[in-house]
Image: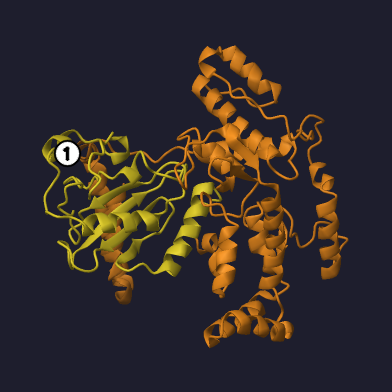
Amino acid sequence: MSSISSKRLAKELKEFHSLNLVGVTLLKADDFKQWLVGIEVMGESLFQNEVFALRFTFDSQYPISSPEVVFIDDGVHHIPPHPHVYSNGHICASILGQEWSPVLSVASVCITLQSMLASCKAKERPPDNDRYVRNAPLSPKNTRFHYDDDTV
Amino acid sequence: MDPHELADVTDPSDFPLEVLKKLDSTFRCTICKEFFEAPVLLTQCGHTFCSLCIRNQLPNKPECPLCKKATKETHLVRNVMFGEAIDTWCKAREDIESIPSTSKRKLDDVICIYNSTSEAEEDISSKPKKRKTKEEVSCPICFRHVLMSSINSHIDNGCKGYLAREDPKLGGSDKLKSKAAWNSIFKQDKRKIYNSPQDSEIPDHDSKLPKVSYGTLTLSGLKTLLSDFGLSTTGDKDALIARHERWIAIYNANLDRAHPKSLGELKTRLEEVEETVNRPAPKRISDEKDWTKKNQDQFKSLIEQAGNGAKRKRGDDESNNQNIPESSSERSERT
């Protein structure tokens, strides 16, 4: 119960409530293993008035090890068509892989992904979407992404 | 989620005043969000982390988690003064939180200086009343008796100190305080728990353990390394290596404390960490279709059972029937 990861997540949960981020809502956080967060891009963008759901999965090594973050399609929410988001919900973002740092948090990941969606120029899938989705591992943490685009 | 899990957590939002919130958060490690434990300075960039936090992180990535500047374990230096500042703040925090309502006048003055909104005044005056209670509660982690008002600090401190009564002979609250004060001076008292002469040994500040290149070691060599410190030698080679790596991190981090703990305490810590890490991970279903096929019969019987139960209950209690079908389907999915 008092493992480092659950202690840290308890604090994040408290912080999350006091931060009151615009366009970021906690959909489900019943335990310290998996959270669902709704994110919406505010202001003018291709994704105006669309709400997407992110699933965070934490292991016992969090925050030393990164959380697994994917977009989910649960009927209500769908997976955003974005050049860095595969149709199975996996996200190609360096901060979720190589560039993860333990000082990042659920809130900071949400803000980053919000801005990733906001700066989207065309609603399309990554060029290698079909190939990747066919062979994708269950968790995007097992994928070695090649981060080649700094603009979005 | 157990609501108590959240109630135990202290964090900067405990304070209604913005400045105090900020002050409180500067005393917390950005990795674990707890008050710094044995703070160390990264000499390449000047950022500070808990010794153990950064020692766990650096093997993954040899850079500062905050500014990404390259660094190494050998660049870590004890941040002595900052450690003292944190200790002092932790004590002051206790007092600020438990200012009784009789001295509200003084507090009002403080608020006038920092913040003149009436909202803050209300907040701060209502809080101490709630926390003033001298009620004793048993700590959910160590089960010892702690005053309700100091349970947060007790847990934050890793279940050390702030005990309501360590010795049943001592009763009154000022006696408690003086006892706590004496305890902090004669810390040896606590170390007596560990009787073995080796375990009670307190390592020297400058005796950092070197890193080991495990590739060149045989299994028996590894076992001697572990048994030199009286550590368990069970498990395969990978488990032994992981244990020794953790031990080095815990051991070296301990040396960054103002008052290093005894080897016995470190061993308990290692066991605790191993326990949380080695807890079997929940099984992941690799092939959903296959899994569904294999367990179809079980699903069916469970759904049937749940359906029967739901029908029966619906007969019993009309008002409850709305959530029964929902929960039963959920259950069948989970199995």
Query: In the rendering, at what x and y percent does residue A40 appear?
Result: 25, 64
Which residue is denoted by mark 1 in the rendering?
A133
Q: Is B226 left, or right, of B184 in this rendering?
A: left
Element under label 1? helix
Q: For the point 54% across and 54% down, which residue is it? A: B33
Q: Quadrant of residue B283?
A: top left
Q: Is B88 left, or right, of B58 in this rendering?
A: right
Query: In the rendering, at what x and y percent does residue B1 appear?
Result: 46, 59
Task: Tell me which chain appears yellow.
Answer: A
Q: Is A58 left, or right, of B202 in this rendering?
A: left
Query: Would residue A67 be seen by someone viewing this image from the given angle?
Result: yes
Going by the numbered disc 1, the residue's amino acid type is: Val
Q: Is residue B207 above or below residue B1?
A: above
Pointer 1 local density, CA inside 10 Å: few below 14, some 14–19, many at least 20? some
Query: In the rendering, at what x and y percent does residue B111 appear?
Result: 62, 82
Task: Tell me which chain appears orange.
Answer: B
As drawn, which residue projects farthest toward the right?
B169
Query: Would residue B136 be seen by someone viewing this image from the given angle?
Result: no
